[in-house]
Every structure is written in C-alpha cells, then in structure tokens.
Image: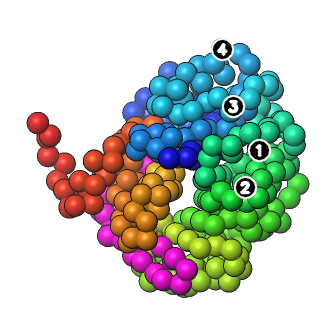
Amino acid sequence: MKKVVTFGEIMLRLSPPGFLRFTQARSFDVIYGGGEANVAASLAQFGMPVDYVTRLPKNDIGEACLQYLRQYGIGTSKIILGGDRLGIYFLENGAVQRGSKVIYDRANSSLAAIQKGMLDWQAVFADADWFHWTGITPAVSQGAAEVCLEAVQTAKQLGLTVSCDLNYRKNLWKWGKKASEVMPELVNFCDVVIGNEEDAEKVFGIKAPEADVTAGKVEASQYRFVCEQLAKRFPGLQTIAITLRGSLSASHNTWSGVLWQAGDFFTALRYDITHIVDRVGGGDAFMSGLIYGLRTYGDDYQKALHFAVAASCLKHSIVGDFNQVSVAEVESIMGGNVSGRVSR
C-alpha cells in the first residue's frame, strides 16, 4: 500500500492539569499536536503507512517533537529543519457550561517562516497516493499558503487523491488576505473535502438552513444543501463530508456526520457523548477515519462514513490531540458496542 502524506504545523500543547483554569495553573501538561499531525497519528494507529511533513526548529524542542511523532509510527523522514521556534498553543479544558479556551503563541514559528522551494514535493510524493492538508496551514502565513499551493499542484499532477479539512480559524488569518481569497484556489485541486457546521459558511458563504448548533439542534438533512453547493462551486470534488456537532454543554455533545458522494447522500448514526474527556482533534479523527474508510471499504461509502464518525466519537474519550484507538475498537463501536464495559 502506498503512503498517505499530510502537511502542516505541529505545536507544543500546554494545558493546566485536569480542568484547572489558566489563572489557577502552577504547571502545564506537555504534549504535541496539530491538525495534520493528528490525522497522521490516527492513520498510523490504523496500520496505514503515513509520512508527516512540516518544518521544525533545529534544537532540543524540535528533536523532542520528532521523537514524539516517531513513537506513534509516523514517518518523519520528509520533515525539514530550520527557523527559530516551535509554535505553542495553550489549552484550558472546559467543563459543563464553561467552554474550553485556546491561546496561540505561534508567531514566527518555523512553519510560519517556510518559503516556496524549501520542500521537494516530487520527492515527498514519490511513494504516496494520497495527500492531506487543512485550512489551518495557509492561514499561518503567506509563505505557508504558497508552499501549500505548491503541494496541491504537484500532488494533482502526480495523480494523488487530495483531501482537505476546511478548518476555518478566524484568529489565524492575519497576514493580509482572507480565507475567502486564498482557499478557493487550493480547494480547486481537491477530490475530498470535510468541514463542520460553520466552515463552509465562514470560508465560502454557504450556510445550512435553520441550523442552530449552540442549541444542540443539528439535523443531518439540512447539510445536503451545503454539500451540493460546495460541489457546484468546486466541480472536481467527488466526496464532501460534514461533521455534525450538537453542543448542549462543554461536557455533553451529540456527534454525527453526513457524506455526499458524486450526488449520493449518506447519513451516520448519532452518538450522545455525555462526559467529554478531550474534544480537541475530533475533526481530525473524523478525517483520518474517512481516509481509512475510503481506502479500505471501496465503494461502501456508508461504511466509510460510519467508521469516520465512530472513530471521532471515541476521540472524545482520549486525552491529547492524537486519537489513540485501533481499527478493532472503532469497528466494535460501529457494531453497537457502546456500553463501555471492561474488556477482559
């Protein structure tokens, strides 16, 4: 099997222990995470060969990050070194009616300072058949956006399947252009796109009718319209998926998804997640589950969608950005085993 390649920024994640607030913290738990690295980690857990591509500083923190990636079976040979620092994000875990908070400290990071020509994409894709990126990468800097464009153009020329998670982050688009000015050209090279209930609206102005995620009301049928409008805007898209999160509180969400495949429309089961441990990376877990499903189940798009939703449901029980679950565990959830009983 050929490799999946993912490209983007990984950051040092610093969180107060448990559910402490930033103002209460006297120490921080340290891990690493980022959208595209999260996808790579999940795919590696599922047994798929995967290379993660980024730019890290040539110092002990960069080396620690490399070692962290390698312990999850992620290929790191295409990572380049340079720049001044690793980006950081601080996460305060929310609970019940208090939402989580994220503070970024990623200005002038190694990835933000990347420039065209630094990566040999022909060599990166030599043994790959799938390339994944997210809307976070072009938001980081003009250089990162230009390198991302290099990547999707080369991937398309070489015949790779190209996937994107729209991942709109309003606090990142600070370098001079809006997402609506940059993303369309990039998405034109994609075969597969996913987003959540607001990504299509914030980036492309496409909104589901009568959707109210903050009231926990997310109806799958409302998002067929979003998929169809995206397909009209980008004729090259074959697969469009939307994650459906109903937020009753920071600790209690409903979770499901829909998939549009060349005109056909599929809906998944809805999971009631009543005691969220860590929701960061939920969308990335869905994306990796979808990539696995599409590469494994052939034309069974319903099964691919069920796998993606079940995998990302499980992510809500895992601390950290990476979804550390196996194919067997996901398939067990797909089969209806949601009791959480002890396995002996």
Amino acid type, mark 2: Leu
Instruction: Give the residue at mark 1.
Output: 122
Of marks 4 and 3, the one in the foreground: 3
Q: Nearer the viewer, residue 8 or 261?
A: 261
Instruction: Give the residue at mark 3.
Output: 79
Give the residues drawn in magenta, as a range: 259-279
Amino acid type, mark 3: Ile
Question: Earlier along the polypeptide chain: callout 4 or callout 3?
Answer: 4
Labels 1 & 3 near each other (Cβ < 8 A): no
Q: Position of residue 12 (x, y in %)?
A: 60, 30
Q: Secondary structure at mark 3?
A: loop
Of marks 1 and 3, the one in the foreground: 1
Q: Nearer the viewer, residue 19 or 278?
A: 278
Instruction: Give the residue at mark 4.
Output: 60
Labels 4 & 1 near each other (Cβ < 8 A): no
Q: Position of residue 196 (x, y in %)?
A: 54, 65
Local packing at callout 1 (Cα closer than 10 Å; few below 14, some 14-19, many 20+) is few
Question: Earlier along the polypeptide chain: callout 4 or callout 1?
Answer: 4
Q: CA distance from mark 1 to mark 3?
A: 14 Å
Local packing at callout 3 (Cα closer than 10 Å; few below 14, some 14-19, many 20+) is some
- Give the residue drawn at x 53%, y 34%: 74
Instruction: Give the residue at mark 2.
Output: 158
